[in-house]
Amino acid sequence: MKRLFSPLFFLSIILIIGCSEKNSKDPIKCYELWLDQKPTQDVRPLHAQYWQSPHWSKEYILYIELQASVTWKDQFIKQNGLVMSSKDIELPADAPVWFKLGKNYKLWKKPGDDISKYYEDSLTGHFFVFEQQL
């Protein structure tokens, strides 16, 4: 007897169904999509915008503003190998209106990554993240 559908067919259907674009402006949901975990007491997402492609490779663009403890920021910087940068930067043209930096900010980058940027407003202490992984 001849098979109507192969196992490969069913695997393809599962992969197609599981691959859908994700968009959110909910700060907590964006945080969870970004880091695959819920915010702790040390960090509070204030504003966010997240887009993820339907591809399995997790291509995404994230803007997020966080109110975070010094401990959270220090751990995030260390875990991600961020280095301070003195370059004057231009924000991406499509940055949300709330993604505005004051004149006093610190800028971090990942070595070898000239796209993603991490800022700390020296006056408010808010941490702004722009990550793009395409």
Image (tube, rainbow, N blue to C red):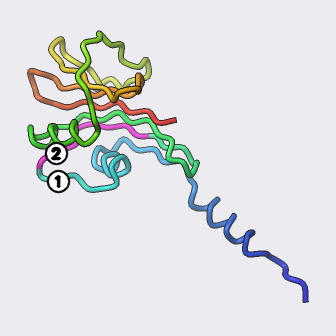
Considering only vertical position in the picture, is 65 above or below 123? below
Callout 2, which amino acid? Val
Q: Which of 118 and 123 lies nearest the eye of the viewer? A: 118
Q: Which of 115 and 52 lies nearest the eye of the viewer? A: 115
The N terminus is located in which quarter?
Answer: bottom right
Is residue 48 found inside the magenta-colored segment of the image? yes
Outermost bottom residue: 1
Identify the residue shown where x is 18% and y is 18%: 105
Identify the residue shown where x is 34% and y is 54%: 36
Q: Quadrant of residue 78?
A: top left
Mark 1 burial class by Cα count in 10 Å: few <14, some 14-19, many 20+? few
Counting from the top left corner in percent of width and height, residue 59 is at 51, 41
Q: Which residue in the protein does label 2 denote?
A: 43
Q: Specify whether 6 is left or right of 13.
A: right
Q: What span is colored magenta in the figure?
A: 42-50
Mark 2 burial class by Cα count in 10 Å: few <14, some 14-19, many 20+? some
Callout 1, which amino acid? Thr
Q: Which residue in the protein does label 1 denote?
A: 40
Counting from the top left corner in percent of width and height, residue 5 is at 80, 76
Q: Specify whether 116 is left or right of 78.
A: right
Q: Mark 1 falls on what kind of element?
A: loop
Task: State yes or no: discs 2 and 1 in contact (Cβ < 8 Å).
Answer: yes
Q: Which of 71 and 24 lies nearest the eye of the viewer? A: 71
Total label count? 2
Considering only vertical position in the picture, is 42 above or below 8? above
Label 2 to label 1: alpha-carbon separation: 6 Å
Considering only vertical position in the picture, is 58 above or below 48? below
Q: Quadrant of residue 93?
A: top left
